[in-house]
C-alpha cells in the first residue's frame, strides 16, 4: 500500500524519510511542511532525517515499538473490529470514576491483564475508568507524565492494539474511559520535538523548562498538533473523555486559549460521533472560569479536579499541617468545600502568602471532581503512603462517605476501595545517567517543605520502587480488606440509586459543624451523613426519625455516631 508521509520542519534545509533501509527525499510544501508518498508494508518502521543528521522518530508517531529513541511504525486503527457500536456514553454528573495506572494495576502491567480485572470495577459499581498517561515515555515503567511521543501508546503496556482491546472491553461492561493527557510539557528524554520546529519557547518558564509554544511564531501548527492528539484519543481509540494535566502550567495569551479550543473541538466531535464526551482539567488556580460556559466568557471545560476538598479532608483526618496543608485543618473547611468547592475564594493563603481563588457563583458542583486520594496526593508523598496507612479504618470510611455521597463527581484511586496495603510511589526508568541522578536527588530535596527525611524517599529508578507499588489482589480475600470493599460498594450503590445526589445544586444542601466535638453533618437529597472525628460517641439530631442505612461501627442507638466514625441515614420525608 502507499502511505502519504508528512512532517513539519520549517527550519530544515532538507528533509528525508528513512524507510526499510532506504532514504527518500521529501518534497517541500507550504509553511514548513514536507511530504512524500511511499509504498509501505504493515510492519515497516520509519524515521525522519533533517539536514542529513541522525534518524528521528515522527513527532506524530502512532507507535514506538522499540521505545522513545527507536523508529516509528504506522498503525491501522480500522483493523480493530470494534464491538461498541451501540455505546453512547452518559453525562459526567452520573459518573463514578476509578483512576488506575496500567503498570501497577496488575502484576503483569498490561492492558490485557487489566481487562481481566474490569469485572471487579463493575461489581464495585464504578462506571468510568481514568487511565494515567499511556503516551510513550522512556523505559518500561513510569507514571507517564514524562511522555514524549504523544500519539504513540506505550509499547510495554501492549501498544495501540492493547488499548483498542481495553477500551472495547470497558464499553462492553458499561465503563467509560478517560485518558489522562499532558499538554503542559514534554519529558526530557527522547524529546525530539524541538529538532523539528518551534514547539517550545523560552519566553515562559515552567517547572519542566521551556514552555510549549502556544502563542508565539509557529504556534498555529503546535496548537493543531495538540488538537489532532485530542481527536485521536476520542476518535481512533473510542475514549470518552480526557483529563488534562496541570493546566495552570499552560501559558497561552491567544485570544482563544488552548483550553477553550480543546473544549470546543471535543463538543463538536461529540456531536459528530453521537457520543457524550468529557474534558476534565486539573488546575490549582481555584478559578471557576475554567468550567464556566463559553457564552459567559469561560473556557467551557466540563469539570475540574478540586484539590481544596481533598486538602481540607486530608488535613482534618490526618492532622498534617505541613506544606500546603498549612492552609487547612478544621471540619469547617470540609463543610465549606462541600458547599462551595473552593475553600479559598479570594482570602489570604498562608502557604502562598497571597490571596487565592475566586467564588464559583451558581455553577453546579458536578463541575468539580471530589476525591480523598489520587495518584498525586498518594504518590507525591515521600513513601507513597495511602490514606488508610495514615488514619484509622473509621476515618478512612469517613473520607469514602464524603467523597461518594458528596455533591461532586467522585473519583477513587486504584486499591483505595479495599484499603490496599501497597503504597503508590514515584518510579521511573530513565536511560540517561544525568537525568537518573537529577530525578533521584530532586525527589529527595522536593520534600523538604513537608519535613520528610531524604533517606525516607525511595529511589525512583529502583525496580523495587515500582514493584512494591503494584496492587496485591490476594488481599481481597482477607476480612479487613473485604470489609472496606463492602463499605465502598454500598456507598457507590447508594449514590447511583439517589439521582438527586448528582444534581450539583448547592442550594439543596446544608452542613453543620461542631469544631469542639469534631462533628460534621452533611445533608443532601434526603441523605444525612454524620462524621465524628472526636473521641466520644455523638448523638445527631438530624438523624431523628430517619432510617439508618450504614454505620462504620455497630451501635444500639440508631442516632449515634461512634468515635472516629460515620453514619448514613435516609430521611423518610424526602
Image: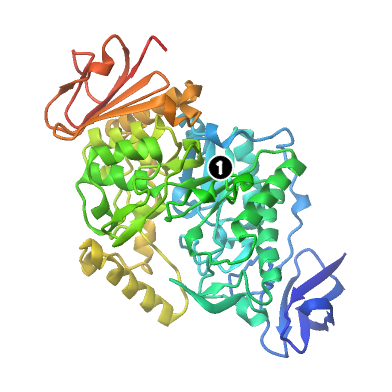
Q: Quadrant of the image for the N terminus?
A: bottom right
Residue 283 position within the rendered picture, expressed as x and y whole percent measured from the top left: 46, 54
Measuring 33% from the left and 38% from the top, which residue is drawn there?
A: 336
Q: Looking at the picture, tell me which residue is in the foreground, 520 or 417.
A: 520
Residue 142 position within the rendered picture, expressed as x and y whole percent measured from the top left: 46, 62
Mark 1 lies on a secondary structure that is helix
Does residue 146 appear in this view?
A: yes
Residue 173 position within the rendered picture, expressed as x and y whole percent measured from the top left: 59, 33
Res. 510 image quadrant:
top left
Q: How dense is the environment of label 1, judged by Cα within 10 Å: few (below 14), some, or many (20 and up)?
A: some
Q: How many marks?
A: 1
Measuring 56% from the left and 42% from the top, which residue is drawn there?
A: 115
Measuring 73% from the left and 74% from the top, which residue is drawn there?
A: 46
In the picture of the structure, the residue carrying the numbered disc 1 is: 115
Compared with residue 425, is residue 4 higher up or lower down, i.e. above or below? below
Q: Coloring scheme of the render? A: rainbow
Compared with residue 506, is residue 214 higher up or lower down, i.e. above or below? below
Q: Quadrant of the image for the C terminus?
A: top left
Q: Looking at the picture, tell me which residue is in the foreground, 501 or 567.
A: 501
Q: Is residue 37 left or right of residue 159?
A: right
Q: Looking at the picture, tell me which residue is in the foreground, 388 or 218.
A: 218
Residue at the far left: name it.
Answer: 536
Does residue 21 appear in this view?
A: no
Residue 159 position within the rendered picture, expressed as x and y whole percent measured from the top left: 62, 58
Q: Looking at the picture, tell me which residue is in the foreground, 127 or 571.
A: 571
Compared with residue 11, is residue 570 higher up or lower down, i.e. above or below? above
Amino acid at each position: 500500500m502507499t502511505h502519504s508521509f508528512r512532517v513539519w520542519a520549517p527550519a530544515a534545509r532538507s528533509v528525508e524519510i528513512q524507510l526499510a533501509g532506504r532514504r527518500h527525499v521529501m518534497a517541500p510544501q507550504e509553511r514548513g511542511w514536507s511530504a512524500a508518498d511511499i509504498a509501505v508494508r504493515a510492519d515497516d518502521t520509519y524515521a525522519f532525517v533533517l539536514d542529513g543528521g541522525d534518524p528521528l522518530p515522527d513527532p506524530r508517531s502512532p507507535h514506538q515499538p522499540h521505545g522513545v529513541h527507536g523508529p516509528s511504525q504506522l498503525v491501522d486503527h480500522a483493523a480493530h473490529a470494534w464491538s461498541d457500536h451501540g455505546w453512547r456514553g452518559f453525562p459526567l454528573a452520573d459518573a463514578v470514576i476509578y483512576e488506575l495506572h496500567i503498570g501497577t494495576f496488575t502484576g503483569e502491567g498490561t492492558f490485557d491483564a487489566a481487562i481481566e480485572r474490569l469485572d471487579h470495577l463493575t461489581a464495585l459499581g464504578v462506571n468510568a475508568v481514568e487511565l494515567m498517561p499511556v503516551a510513550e515515555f522512556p523505559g518500561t515503567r513510569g507514571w507517564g507524565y514524562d511522555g514524549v511521543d504523544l500519539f504513540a501508546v506505550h509499547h510495554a503496556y501492549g501498544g495501540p492494539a492493547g488499548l483498542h482491546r481495553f477500551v472495547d472491553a470497558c464499553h462492553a461492561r458499561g465503563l467509560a474511559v478517560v485518558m489522562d493527557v499532558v499538554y503542559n510539557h514534554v519529558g526530557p528524554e527522547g524529546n525530539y520535538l524541538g529538532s523539528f520546529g518551534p514547539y517550545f519557547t523560552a519566553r515562559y518558564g515552567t517547572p519542566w523548562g521551556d514552555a510549549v509554544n502556544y502563542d508565539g511564531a509557529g504556534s498555529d501548527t503546535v496548537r493543531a498538533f495538540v488538537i489532532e492528539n485530542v481527536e485521536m484519543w476520542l476518535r481512533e481509540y473510542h475514549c470518552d473523555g480526557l483529563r488534562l494535566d496541570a493546566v495552570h502550567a499552560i501559558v497561552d495569551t491567544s485570544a482563544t486559549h488552548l483550553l477553550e479550543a480543546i473544549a470546543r473541538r471535543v463538543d463538536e466531535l461529540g456531536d459528530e460521533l453521537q457520543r457524550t464526551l468529557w474534558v476534565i482539567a486539573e488546575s490549582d488556580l481555584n478559578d471557576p472560569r475554567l468550567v464556566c460556559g463559553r457564552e459567559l466568557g469561560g473556557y467551557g471545560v466540563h469539570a475540574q479536579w478540586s484539590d481544596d476538598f481533598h486538602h481540607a479532608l486530608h488535613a482534618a483526618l490526618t492532622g498534617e499541617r505541613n506544606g500546603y496543608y498549612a492552609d487547612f485543618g478544621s471540619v469547617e473547611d470540609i463543610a465549606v468545600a462541600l458547599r462551595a468547592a473552593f475553600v479559598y475564594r479570594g482570602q489570604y493563603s498562608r502557604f502562598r502568602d497571597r490571596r487565592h481563588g475566586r467564588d464559583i457563583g451558581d455553577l453546579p458542583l458536578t463541575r468539580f471532581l471530589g476525591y480523598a486520594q489520587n495518584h498525586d496526593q498518594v504518590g507525591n508523598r515521600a513513601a507513597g503512603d495511602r490514606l488508610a496507612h495514615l488514619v484509622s479504618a473509621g476515618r478512612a470510611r469517613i473520607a469514602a462517605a464524603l467523597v461518594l455521597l458528596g455533591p461532586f463527581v467522585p473519583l477513587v484511586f486504584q486499591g483505595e476501595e479495599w484499603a490496599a496495603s501497597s503504597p503508590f510511589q514515584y518510579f521511573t526508568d530513565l536511560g540517561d545517567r544525568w537525568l537518573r541522578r537529577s530525578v533521584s536527588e530532586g525527589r529527595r530535596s522536593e520534600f523538604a517543605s513537608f519535613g520528610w527525611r531524604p533517606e525516607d524517599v525511595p529511589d525512583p529508578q529502583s525496580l523495587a520502587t515500582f514493584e512494591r507499588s503494584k496492587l496485591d489482589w490476594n488481599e481481597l480475600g482477607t476480612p479487613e480488606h473485604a470489609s472496606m470493599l463492602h463499605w465502598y460498594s454500598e456507598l457507590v450503590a447508594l449514590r447511583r440509586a439517589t439521582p438527586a445526589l448528582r444534581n450539583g445544586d448547592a442550594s439543596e444542601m446544608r452542613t453543620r459543624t461542631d469544631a469542639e466535638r469534631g462533628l460534621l453533618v452533611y445533608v443532601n437529597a434526603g441523605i444525612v451523613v454524620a462524621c465524628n472525628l472526636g473521641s466520644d460517641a455523638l448523638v445527631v439530631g438530624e438523624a431523628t426519625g430517619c432510617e439508618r442505612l450504614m454505620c462504620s461501627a455497630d451501635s444500639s442507638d440508631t442516632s449515634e455516631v461512634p468515635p472516629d466514625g460515620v453514619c448514613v441515614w435516609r430521611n423518610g420525608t424526602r
